[in-house]
């Protein structure tokens, strides 16, 4: 079977940053190891949900029926997914990325740059900006950046850090209209550092090292 190109990126939980391709007609999600996407999360049902490939797009279907499958913060039974939709099952958050070939008005640009219609497309840009995260234990994860992402100790943050030295909503990374990314410290208690210097606001450049609590991030422009 031909791969479609659509995929999920896990934004929270033990598999933070993991990319999962959606290449089957039906992809199952849950806490059972029999599921295609196994979530090691006690708050997720054994067979939580499925993503179906249909002629009209990818359809998320809640398989458990307890009103605990969410898309963009809203409970769903069935919903056709759009590029960038935020899925939440238990404590695990995922981002849906559509097949590059099925999006309307798609150009060969960074996956997020096509949102800024006033900009001149760069035909050589084929990947989105991201962070390479190294936690206090030395584990490394890769995270794709959305247009705006929060970092902090709150489980509502896009990037959840289980670190008591981190504020609940410690910092925010935003993509600006010109395609650059700005890091903003949200008046955190312990500060946000870029290349070992404390910052309040900072435009990020390729290879910049961000420190928040005991976690280090390396910024890559894509």
Image (cartoon, rainbow, N blue to C red):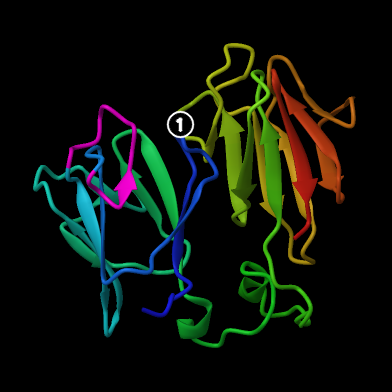
Q: Quadrant of residue 8?
A: bottom left
Task: Look at the magenta stretch and give its main secondary structure.
Answer: loop
Q: Residue at x 86, y 45 (%)?
A: 207
Which percent across, then down, holds residue 145? 63, 52
Q: Quadrant of residue 184?
A: top right
**Residue 43 is covered by the magenta coloring:** yes
Q: Is residue 36 above or below residue 126?
A: above
Q: Residue at x 64, y 19 (%)?
A: 137
Q: Residue at x 64, y 76 (%)?
A: 114
Q: Is residue 118 left or right of residue 70?
A: right
Which percent across, then down, holds residue 82? 40, 69
Image quarter in which the C terminus is found: bottom right
Which percent across, then down, holds residue 36? 30, 52
Of 22 and 190, the residue lying toward us:
22
**Seen from this angle, which residue lies furthest top?**
164
Q: Is residue 207 left or right of residue 44?
A: right
| Disc 1: which residue | 14
Looking at the rendered structure, the secondary structure element under dot 1 is loop
Image quarter in which the N terminus is found: bottom left
Query: Dot 1, how many residues are within 10 Å of its Cα: few (below 14), some (14-19), or many (20+)?
Result: few
Q: Which residues are magenta?
A: 34-46
**Seen from this angle, which residue lies furthest front?**
1
**Residue 205 is covered by the magenta coloring:** no
Q: Is residue 5 above or below residue 19?
A: below
Q: Quadrant of residue 24?
A: bottom left
């Amino acid at each position: 079977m031909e791969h479609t190109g659509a995929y999920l990126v896990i934004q929270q939980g033990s598999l933070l940053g993991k990319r999962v391709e959606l290449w089957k007609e039906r992809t199952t999600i849950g806490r059972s190891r029999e599921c295609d996407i196994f979530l090691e999360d006690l708050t997720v049902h054994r067979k939580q949900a499925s993503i179906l490939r249909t002629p009209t797009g990818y359809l998320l279907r809640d398989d458990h029926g307890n009103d605990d499958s969410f898309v963009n913060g809203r409970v769903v039974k069935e919903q056709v997914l759009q590029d960038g939709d935020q899925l939440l099952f238990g404590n695990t958050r995922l981002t849906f990325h559509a097949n590059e070939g099925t999006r309307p008005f798609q150009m060969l640009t960074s996956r997020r740059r096509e949102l800024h219609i006033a900009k001149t497309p760069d035909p050589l840009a084929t990947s989105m900006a991201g962070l390479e995260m190294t936690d206090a234990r030395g584990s490394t994860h890769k995270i794709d950046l959305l247009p705006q992402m929060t970092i902090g100790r709150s489980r509502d943050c896009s990037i959840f850090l289980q670190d008591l030295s981190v504020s609940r909503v410690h910092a925010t990374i935003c993509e600006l209209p010109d395609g650059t990314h700005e890091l903003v410290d949200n008046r955190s208690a312990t500060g946000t550092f870029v290349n070992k210097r404390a910052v309040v606001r900072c435009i990020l450049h390729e290879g910049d090292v961000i420190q928040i609590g005991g976690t280090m991030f390396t910024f890559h422009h894509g």
